[in-house]
Amino acid sequence: MKFTFKTGIYLVVATTIATLVAIGGAYQLSVTERVEQAKAETQSQRIIAKLEELVSAKEEAESATLNYLIGRSEQELEQLRKAGARSQIEIVYLAEFVADNAIQQHRVAALDVATKAMISLRQQAIRLHQQQGTAAALSFISSDAYLGNAREAERLVDEMRREERYLAAERDERFAARTRQLTPFTAWSALMAIGLALFAAAAISRQREERRMTEARLHDQEKQHRLVTSSVPAMIAYVDTRQRLQFHNHAIEKLLDLPGERLYNHHLAEVLGTDNYMSIVPEIKLALQGKRVDYERKWPGKDGRWQYLAGSFIPDYDGTGRVRGFFAMIIDVSARKLAEEALRASEERWKFALEGAGDGVWDRNIQTGEILYSRRYQEMLGFSDEEFQNRREEWEKRIHPEDKPRVMAELQAYLHGKSPDYASEFRMLCKDGSWKWLLSRGMVVSRDADGKPLRMIGTHADISERVRQQEEIARVNERLDLALQGSKLAIWDVDLAAGSVYLSEGWAEMLGEAPHETFTDGASLLELVHPDDRERIRAMSLATVKGASPAYHIEHRVRTRSGDWRWILSRGRVVKRNATGRALRVTGTNADITARKEIERMKNEFISVVSHELRTPLSSIVGSLGLLAGMTGLSEQTQTLIRVARDNSQRLVRIVNDILEFEKLDSDALEIPLEPVELEALLSSAIAANQGYAEQYGVGMALAGSHGPAWVNANVDKLMQVMANLLSNAAKFSPSGTHVEVRLARMRDVFRVSVIDSGPGIPEEFKPRMFERFAQADSSTSRQRGGTGLGLAICKMIIDKLGGKIDFVSAPGLGTTFYFDLEAHPPATHRKAERPRAARAS
Amino acid sequence: MNMEHPLKKIMLVEDDPDIQLITRLSLETGGGYEVRVCGSGAEAVQSARAYAPDLILLDVMMPGMDGLATMDALRKLPGMAATPMVFFTANTQDQIRQDLLRRGALDVIIKPVEPNALVEQIRAIWQRFAAGSSP
C-alpha cells in the first residue's frame, strides 16, 4: 500500500487525537483491547487444541507401537511413522503459536526434544523386537527410561495447558478490572470518538480514493507479474519465514494439484503433505538461514509415477539484512532424468553383455585422456582394480613396442575419419611379465558440434589362443607343403554338397602342367580317367561315401596333357558327415605310381622268365631222376646216388618256388582274392596233404576235436600254402614217434589255428628273427632238414595280406606252437555260400 | 565221353626235347598211356585230327605258336572243340594260371613235377573231366 503526504497528515492528526483520547481514558477499555483480548483468547484455544492433537498423536504412536510389538503388522509401523510425523508438525505449529511467550517457547523446545526422544525410543523398541523378540521389546517399553520420557512429555503438555488456562484467567481478571474503570471516561471517549470519526471519515474518503487508484495499478502489475510467472514452465513460489506460501505460480498449482486458495498463506506442511514436507525440511532450514540451496528430488506425481524436480531456494533479505523468506524456483527434469537412467541402464546392459562374453570394456574421454577400464579388462592382464589407473597411459605403456606405432596409426586414422572403423590387434604386457594378444575394437559415441570426437567406447578380446592356433596352422601348413613337395603328392578335397573338387598344385604337375591349384568337378575329373578304370572308381567312391568301405583306396590311370597314361594311387576318407551320417567332405591324396607300376611289370616279367628258365631244366632233371628211381635192376650204390640227386633236385625246386613266391608276395600290388573259407574242412585237407611228408620223419598229425563250421574270408590256396609250411616245419622238428596237433578255436571275433609240435623249441635269441627271410636258428638245420629259410616269411606275408595275425609261443625243450588268427566272417554272409573250393593236395 | 571211355591217347605239345622225352616216358611207363609228341603248335594242329587224342597236354611258352594260340587253333578243328586240353607250364604266377583256365584250359600242371606225380595229376584230371561230362 502506498501512503501519500496527505494521508500522512490525516493520520498524524488522527493519531494525535487518538493519543489524547488514550491519555484521557488511560484506564478505559478501548475497542482495540477488546479485540486483543479476543485474539489472545483464540490463540490460547489454538495452543490447547494443538496440545490435544499432540497428545492424540502420541497416544496413536503408543498404541501403534504396542500393536506392532504384539501383532507385528507392517501397517502398524506405517501408522507409527505417520503419528511421529504428525507430532513433529504439531510442535512446529505450537512453536509458531507461542512466539510471544518466552516461557511457553521454552516449554515447546523441551517438548520438541521429548517428542524426538520418544520417536527414537519407539524405534529402539521396534529394533529390539526385530532382533531379540517381543519380550525384550515389551520389557524395554516398560523401562524407566522409556516411561520417564513419556512422563516428561506429558508433564510439559500439562504445564503448557495450565499456563494457557492461567493466562486466560488473568486476561479475564484484567478485562473485568478495566471494565470497572471504564465508566467516568466513557462519555469523553464517545465524544472524542465521534469527532475523530468525523475527521477520519473525511480523511479516509480521500485516502480511499487514492488507495483505490494505487490498488488498481498494483492489480495491473500483479496481473502482468502473474502472467509472466504463469507462462514460464518453471514452478515459482515465495515462502516466508513462517513457512507459509505467499506467492506461487500456476505451475505450482499443477504440480500440487491444488487450487490457489488452498495454497496461499498455508503452511508448507499442509500444502505439500507430511512426507513430502519432511523430505525437504533440511533445505528449507538452510534457505531460511540465508543459504542458497540447489537440490534434486524424486517427487510423487499425480498419476502415481515419479517426477524428478530440480529446485533452487534463494533467500530473500529485508533492508536490515535479515532473511524474510525465500524464493523457490523448481523445474521438472523428469525427461532428462529418465533419458539419463535409460542411458545408464543401456550402458550397464551392454557392459554386462560384453563382459559376460569374456571381453573387457573401455570407455575413453578423448579430451581429458581419462579411460575407464572394466574389471574384466584388468583381469585379462592380471590386474585388480586398485592397480590400474583410469588413464590412457596405462594402456599405451603396456603395448608391445613392435606393435605400438601401428596401433597408434590405426587409432588416429579412425579418429580422423580416414578409416571407417577401429579394430587393432596387438600384444599387451601382463602383470606377470608375459605378453597377451588382444583385439581392440571401438567406436566414437559422441562428438562435439564440429564433429570432433569426445567419447569413444570399445572392447578388448583376448585372442592369444587364436593367434597361437594361427601360428600353429601356419607351421603345420609349412610342414605339409614340404612333405607334399617331397613326396610328390597332390591333395584333393571333395565337397559333396557343392559337387566341387579342389586339387593342390601337385595334381597339375602329374598331368604335365605348370603347378597350379585346380578347382573342378567330379565329372570333369572322371573324363581324364582310363575308360577301363571308371567303373571301379564309381564303385569305390560309392562304397566310401556310404561307409561300406572304411577308406577310399584305388589305383587307376589318367591321361596327361601329352596323351600318355599315368598310374595314380588315390587314397582318402570321409572327413565330415552330417548328423544323419551323410558324407559331406572326402579328402585324400593322389600319388603318381607310374614308375612303381613299371617296376612291378618288369618284376613280373622277370619272375615269368626266371620261372621258365630255371624250371625247364629242373623239369628235365627231376623227371629223369624220377624215372631212374623207378627202374629195376640197379645196384644199391646207383640207387643211393640217384636218391641223393633226387632229394637235392626236389630241394632246389622248393627253393626256386619259395623265392618266386616271396617275390610275388612282396609286391604291394599283389592282392589276394578273397573267398569264403571253412577252416575245419581246410585243416583236414591240409593234414591229409602233408601226412605223407610227416611220415618220413615218423611223426603223426591230427586235428584236435571238432569245432563245427568256422567261416573266414580268405583264400584256400594261400591258406593251404601256410598250413603246408607250418605242418612241414612242425613235422621236421618233432622227435620221431610224436604227434603234431592242429587246433581250431574261436577267440571273440577271430578264429585261431594252432600247430603244436613237441620239438626242441626256439632259442630265445632267435625269436625276434623268426619271420625274417632266410632266418634259421642253425644254418646247418636247413641243409639237414631241407628247408629254404623262406617258409615262415611267406606265411607271415600271406596272413598279413589276409588281414590276420601270425605268431608263436615256444620254450626250449617244451615244443613250439605256431598260430594265426583270422577274423570270423558272420555265418549269415555265407548262408547260401558255395562250399569251400576243394583244397587240393599240392 | 563217359566213365566207360578210359584215357588212352595223349598228345604232348612241347618244344624242349628233354622234357618231351621225360614226359613221354613218364606217361607211357607210369600211366600206360599212348603218347604222341609234337615239337610245335603247328605240328600239333597238323596231326591232331588224324591222331584224335583223348587229351592234349600243352606247353605254354613255345617259339612260333605259343600254347594258347595252339589251343585256339586246335579248338577250331572239326571234332576237337570239346577235347580236354591241359597246360603244362613252369610259370607259377596265379595271373597266368587264371588266364589259361578262363580261356578254356581244363587244368594247369606246374613244372617241374615228379613222373609219378604227373601221372597221378593226369589221372585225377581225367576222372574229374569224365565225371563232369558223363550224362
Image (cartoon, helix red, strand yellow):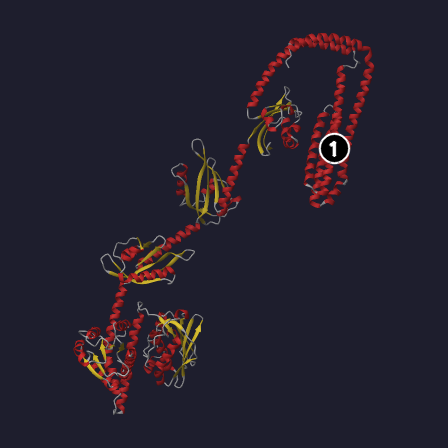
Residue closest to the eye, A521 or A335? A521
Residue density around tag 1, few if under 14, some if 14–19, many if 20 or more, within 10 Å: some
- Residue A313 visible in rendering: no
* Position of residue A515 in the picture relative to residue A389 (left or right): left
- The image quadrant of residue A303 is top right
Chain letter of the residue carrying label 1: A
Residue A279 is drawn in which quadrant? top right
- A306 or A101, nearer to the observer: A306
Up-down relation of residue A170 to residue A605 (above or below): above
* SS of the residue under disc 1: helix
Tell me the quarter of the image containing the N terminus of chain A: top right
Mark count: 1
Q: Quadrant of residue A191?
A: top right
Task: Specify whether A585 is left or right of A69.
Answer: left
Q: Residue A169's x, y, as percent?
A: 81, 23
Locate residue A713, reporting x and y percent: 37, 70
Dot 1 amino acid type: Ser
Can the viewer see residue A527 in this picture? yes
Picture coordinates of residue A578 (x, y %)?
A: 41, 55
According to the image, label 1 marks what residue? A56
Quadrant in the picture for the C terminus of chain A: bottom left
Percent across and percent down for residue A430 are 47, 48
Compared with A390, A717 (above or below) is below
Q: Residue furthest front?
A: B135
Query: Camera-side residue: A418 or A737?
Result: A737
